Amino acid sequence: MKSSGQKTALQVPMLDLGRGYAGIREEVLEAIARVCDSQHYILGEEVTAFEREFAALCGSAHAVACASGTDALWLGLAASGIKSGDSVITTPFSFFATASSIVRAGARPVFVDIEAETLNIDPEKVRQKLQAASPRPQAMMPVHLYGQCADMEDLNRIAGEFGLSVVEDAAQAVGAAWNGKIAGSVGGSAAFSFYPTKNLSAFGDAGILTTNDTELAERARSLRNHGSKQRYYHDEIGANSRLDSIQAAVLRVKMKRLPQWNKERADRARVYDQLFERAGLVGSANHKATKVALLKTRPQALHIFHQYVVRVPQRDELRNFLKQRGVSTEIYYPVPLHLQKCFAYLGHAEGDLPEAERAAKDVLALPMFPELKIEEQKYVVENIAEFFS
Ligand SMILES: Cc1ncc(COP(=O)(O)O)c(C=O)c1O
């Protein structure tokens, strides 16, 4: 393993939003001007049009726009009828909001371990958990991690058998699909995030819930607006989670480019795979012999590579080496959810969910965005090769 004495030749960011913005600047500014001229800033025509277009993109009947992906997750659970005292199965290897939304809906998260090859929740372990659980959880929230859908066929089958609602956490997966069905129309409902780093991103916080269930959509629509269908009449306690018109206008411009951007992400993932293979860095699945282990894309998945993540046993040393060479990386996620301090009341200890715990120690996300250049990808992999030389 080398120390990084060499001069920095390139700076490779994880994400450069500026490159994408350069290509759409005029159109975005026009869209924002349209909203300013209308003087209508919350919900309204712009949001309704965005909801219609986003539902069409996902092949779902309804879309309910809201203030963030976090709120969309909560809306999905609450509108599915999850309430105080219920429990919801989810993955321990995700962003915090996946689990916090369950608590916010009044329920208890039930963590089930992940598959080593995709880092998505393991359907077989979900089945085992449900067979043993008493009382049974009322819902499951699979996460489409890094842009690859969880095994929605198996999960839907299991949910059907055990009578669970399914709320997809599709925050990282706009445009992804499983067996030809687009994320957002695979489960009972699906939550998306348009946080600025996401593959479809707003100019601030924004989110949306999609569903084919008309009743669920109506309840979510009311919940995002203080539980009110008619002004000043409140059927239940909701939240202020309405989407700003400016965000909808920006998202409508960007959404037109999404298929191309997703394709460019997948192309870059293929380039990374090839560069790693050619550099002889890809180790066996036997972790001890591995330099770099690549995650698997399942044949059923249309993976949109929100992130390109590899597994490296010497992750922290490599990350530090790359930083000194000008290469930015990230760790999604360094602490599995079941070991977060705020979930101590669930009574988990280290060793309970070994795959998630191992992933937290060895995952490394490399620079990934549609405008990433091939020279930059080569530079990243060359430096990883040098680290191991
Ligand atoms: C898997 C996952 N779930 C939920 C969220 C929450 O979305 P937001 O940041 O828009 O609230 C995010 C993104 O931040 C995420 O990556």
Image (cartoon, rainbow, N blue to C red):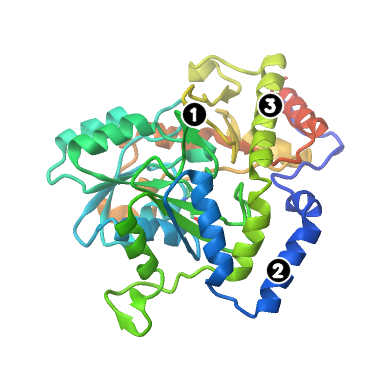
Residue displayed at 47% across by 30% down? 180
Cα–Cα gap, marks 2 and 3: 36 Å
Depth check, mark 3 against mark 1: the one in front is: 1
Q: Judging from the image, what secondary structure is the residue with disc 2 in? A: helix
Q: Amino acid at mark 3?
A: Tyr
Residue 272 has which mark?
3
| 90, 285: nearer the viewer | 90
Whether the residue carrying mark 1 lies under 8 Å from ligand 1 is answered with: no
Q: Position of residue 211 (x, y in %)?
A: 39, 51
Depth check, mark 2 against mark 3: the one in front is: 2
Q: Judging from the image, what secondary structure is the residue with disc 1 in? A: strand
Q: Quadrant of the N terminus?
A: top right
Residue displayed at 31% across by 82% down? 233
299 over 190 or under it: above or below: above
Q: Quadrant of the C terminus?
A: top right
Q: Which of disc 1 and disc 2 is earlier in sequence? A: 2
> Would residue 110 appear left or right of 370 to someone viewing this image?
left
Mark 3, other Cα within 10 Å: few <14 / some 14–19 / many ≥20:
many
Residue 301 has which mark?
1
The residue wearing badge 2 is 32
Depth check, mark 2 against mark 1: the one in front is: 2
> Would residue 2 appear left or right of 236 to someone viewing this image?
right
Which quarter of the picture shows residue 75? bottom left
Q: Which of disc 1 and disc 3 is earlier in sequence? A: 3
Q: Amino acid at mark 2?
A: Ile
Mark 1, other Cα within 10 Å: few <14 / some 14–19 / many ≥20:
many
Residue displayed at 69% across by 19% down? 274
Q: Amino acid at mark 1?
A: Ala
Evaluate whether residue 221 shows in this view: yes
